[in-house]
Image (cartoon, helix red, strand yellow):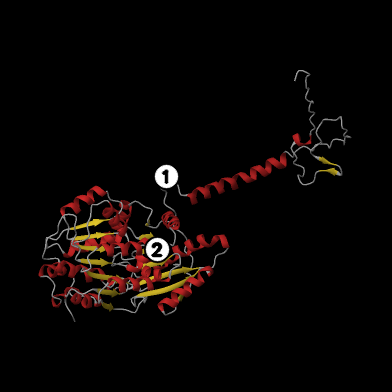
């Protein structure tokens, strides 16, 4: 078995790896690191959770060991599709480069330009950024990319989904032709293949797993949800989700719950909290500080259920996620591979449940076609009675308020019946029909018609509806 000590890495890097508790590299690390150290371009294709980040951070730190960064001219560049993934890559560099003097800067949204400008002006060896924020700094004249020696594109297929490919192509054009490129993706769409053919030079292709395959350590299940009514689909799925979580018991130490829409993320998280679960939402509309704080709580274990949009589906490394629940079937089949890849990482076992309604059949078929195998079907869990909702700081839960209101109505109902029986409404005699002439300006009796009284109001006709009112004609003076 290959060990990290066999990979010709910098001794300072090896020391940091050992202190992190790693002894043997993963397959993609064992295959990619030797080629990267030789200065070759690397095209890595592997499913999530296989250690792709370390496969480029370790050789980068070794290769950048000699040299010095100049102001506003980073020596290397790492592009990530989301803020969370960029921050995670930065944490990896902090872990593995702690015994070196290499500097880094993280350019993501949600942080002031001034703080990032100060880091760039000092000169950095490693620049980690999202494409949009990187181009913002470049267009402001605060950044030059002519000194980039190593460029990394991480989660390229996610870049494609998020519409970053034009930005990626522009950034490639701003870097030197002689750069070394590491290009990583879990899938190889035609557009991704076109970019690799254009910008990579004689790249070594490393594929440690069949494209679009799911990890064998993940137990998958498809739970069919047949709504009681068409407009009850969302509520019925929330009921089934809660039953699934409860049925897993203590085995569900933590979980990520994926929704297709941001608004549904908030609703599902709020619903879970109202039923006594420890849950919080994360999606792109939240402030960066709140997103990072929520992720930190999830990593530390103080948060059990993370309800997320696909902003968290790619690249987030939380090794001990026990379960993934797809509240919605992803509309893009590749997203299914990335979502369930949040569990079963680093050789651990994991479970992934997907809730599907009859309307999701075409999406399920697309997923099964992509992964090359059917998703095992599972029975709907038996309903579990909800625990009493905990009153919030704003007051009692809405469920208890509704219960009390219903009880008050039930208690008040008998009294109303008695009162009605004791005092029946008076019967108002029908006024005799009156002949209406052109000179008669009085309105017609609203409770009568030509052929008899109005039918439909029963005996409870208000008295004012049975009366006639005379309207005096307007007098127009000669002066007007």
Rendered view: 218 above or below 402: below
Rendered view: 378 above or below 169: below
Q: Residue 375, how many percent across, how many down?
A: 44, 76
Going from N to C along the chain, the mark reached first, 2 or 1, is 2
In this rendering, the count of numbered labels is: 2
Q: Residues within 10 Å of mark 1 (few under 14, many from 20)?
A: few
Q: Residue 191, how many percent across, how many down?
A: 37, 71
Q: Check the picture and name the quadrant holding the N terminus.
A: bottom left
The residue at 33%/61% (across/down) is: 167
Instruction: Give the label, 2 or 1, closer to the camera.
Output: 2
Residue 124 seen in the figure: yes
Residue pointed to by mark 2: 257
Nearer to us in this view, 382 or 468? 468
Nearer to us in this view, 238 or 106? 106
Residue pointed to by mark 1: 394
The residue at 42%/70% (across/down) is: 353
In the picture, measured across the screen, residue 240 lies left or right of residue 19, that is right
Residue 298 seen in the figure: no
Nearer to us in this view, 199 or 15? 199
In the picture, measured across the screen, residue 463 lies left or right of residue 301, that is right
Q: For numbered disc 2, what is the local secondary structure? A: strand
Rendered view: 442 above or below 225: above
Q: Residue 35, how many percent across, how many down?
A: 20, 76
């Amino acid at each position: 078995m290959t060990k990290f000590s066999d990979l010709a890495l910098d001794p300072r890097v090896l020391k940091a790896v050992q202190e992190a508790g790693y002894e043997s590299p993963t397959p993609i690390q064992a295959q990619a690191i030797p080629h990267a150290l030789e200065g070759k371009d690397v095209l890595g294709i592997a499913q999530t959770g296989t250690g792709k980040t370390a496969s480029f951070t370790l050789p980068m730190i070794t290769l950048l060991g000699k040299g010095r960064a100049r102001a506003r001219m980073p020596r290397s560049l790492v592009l990530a599709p989301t803020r969370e993934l960029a921050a995670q890559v930065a944490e990896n560099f902090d872990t593995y480069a702690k015994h070196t003097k290499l500097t880094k800067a993280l350019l993501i949204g949600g942080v002031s330009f001034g703080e990032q400008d100060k880091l760039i002006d000092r000169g950095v060896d490693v620049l980690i950024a999202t494409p949009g924020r990187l181009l913002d700094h470049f267009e402001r004249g605060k950044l030059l990319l002519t000194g980039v020696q190593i460029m990394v594109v991480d989660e390229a297929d996610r870049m494609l989904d998020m519409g970053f490919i034009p930005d990626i192509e522009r950034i490639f054009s701003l870097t030197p032709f002689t750069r070394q490129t590491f290009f990583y993706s879990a899938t190889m769409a035609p557009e991704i293949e076109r970019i690799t053919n254009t910008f990579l030079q004689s790249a070594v292709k490393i594929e440690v797993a069949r494209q679009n395959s799911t990890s064998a350590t993940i137990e998958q299940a498809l739970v069919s949800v047949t709504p009681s009514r068409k407009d009850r689909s969302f509520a019925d799925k929330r009921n089934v989700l809660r039953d699934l979580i409860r049925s897993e018991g203590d085995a569900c130490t933590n979980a990520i719950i994926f929704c297709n829409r941001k608004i549904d993320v908030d609703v599902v998280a709020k619903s879970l909290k109202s039923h006594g679960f420890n849950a919080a939402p994360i999606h792109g509309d939240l402030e960066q500080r709140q997103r990072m704080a929520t992720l930190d709580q999830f990593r530390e274990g103080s948060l059990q259920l993370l309800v997320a949009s696909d902003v968290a589906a790619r690249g987030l490394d939380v090794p001990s996620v026990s379960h993934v629940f797809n509240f919605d079937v992803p509309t893009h089949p590749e997203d299914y591979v990335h979502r369930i890849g949040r569990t079963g990482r680093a050789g651990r076992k994991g479970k992934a449940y997907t809730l599907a309604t009859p309307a999701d059949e075409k999406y399920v078929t697309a997923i099964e076609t992509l992964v090359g195998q059917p998703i095992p079907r599972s029975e709907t869990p038996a309903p579990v009675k909800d625990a009493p909702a905990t009153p919030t700081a704003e007051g009692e839960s809405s469920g208890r308020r509704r219960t009390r209101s219903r009880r008050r109505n039930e208690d008040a109902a008998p009294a109303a019946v008695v009162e009605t029986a004791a005092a029946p409404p008076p019967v108002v005699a029908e006024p005799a029909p009156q002949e209406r002439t052109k000179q008669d300006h009085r309105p017609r009796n609203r409770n009568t018609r030509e052929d008899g009284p109005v039918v439909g109001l029963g005996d409870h006709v208000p008295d004012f509806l049975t009366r006639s009112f005379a309207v005096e004609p307007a007098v127009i003076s000669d002066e007007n």
